[in-house]
Amino acid sequence: MDARTIVIGDIHGCYDELVALLDKVQAGASDRIIAVGDLIVKGERNREVLDFFMSDARCASVLGNHDRAILRYWRGKKKKLSEQQEDCRRELESGRERYEAYLSSLPLTLDLGAHLVVHAGVRPGVALADQSAKDLTELRTLEGKRSSPKGTPWYEVYDGAQTILFGHWPAPLVRRGARALGLDTGCVYGYELTAYIIETGEFVQVKAARPYDDPGKRLRKAKKRLAKEGDEAEG
Ligand SMILES: [Mn+2]
């Protein structure tokens, strides 16, 4: 079999599903295994995912917003982690030195020629060299707050020369733009882990063993907190 480039959506510590997916695509010795970032946080086997990516020469990844948060915390550049990031940091703490070195080594973009891998997105009309780390790791929509799901998705506007392979914005189906494919199909929320094979254009998916996180619960919690803050501000 010819060497393939297997690009995988957000793994978020879902090591069992990663192993099942690589088994399903029959990843061989000459294949490349490339992740769109957010290797860790929210799932349960963050160490195993990092250990695999660190030890297997076929693997590469870009930096995701959660990977970046933990890295910045370790470097003293971020004061507070989310509850889930803090759980993950604790899981990684005994191997911090090697995990920090690995996360430090991850680029924000990976140039595959006709394709470009980034975690979240690129701002249309801005040269790649001028894209901010925050856009590359957090961008969803073009109006207002970059991480907001409300507004025009960046990939509906982007029409650059390279096809962007990204994650970050989970959806039940692969997100598609004219020049972009969003591969985060919400494995950690109980949906699928998706691989896209560049050379053949195939999508291969495995179903999550179970949901490891509930986005609804977090949303409800955040709304409650905002409502409370609003009350306090008014009162
Ligand atoms: Mn993300």
Image (spheres, grey):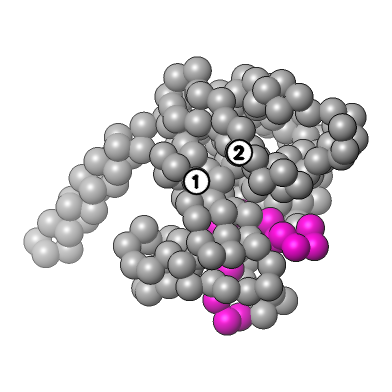
Using the rendered image of the protein, determine whether residue 14 is visible from the camera's viewpoint.
yes
Q: Which residue is mark 2?
A: 203
Q: Are the two marked residues, 1 and 2, in contact with CB atoms closer than 8 angstroms?
A: yes
In which quadrant is the N terminus drawn? top right
Residue sitting at 41 percent across and 39 percent down?
172
Disc 1: CA contacts within 10 A as few (<14), some (14-19) or many (>=20): some
Q: Residue 174 bears which disc, if any?
A: 1
Q: Is residue 169 left or right of residue 180?
A: left
Look at the picture and state if 22 lies above or below 215: above
Using the rendered image of the protein, determine whether residue 90 is visible from the camera's viewpoint.
no
Residue sitting at 45 percent across and 19 percent down?
210
Residue sitting at 48 percent across and 51 percent down?
175
- Amino acid type of the residue tagged 1 in the rendering: Val
Q: Please tell me whether mark 1 sits on a helix, a strand or a loop.
A: loop
Which residues are drawn in magenta? 112-126
In which quadrant is the C terminus drawn? bottom left
Q: At which x and y percent is residue 26?
A: 76, 24
Q: At which x and y percent is residue 202?
A: 64, 40
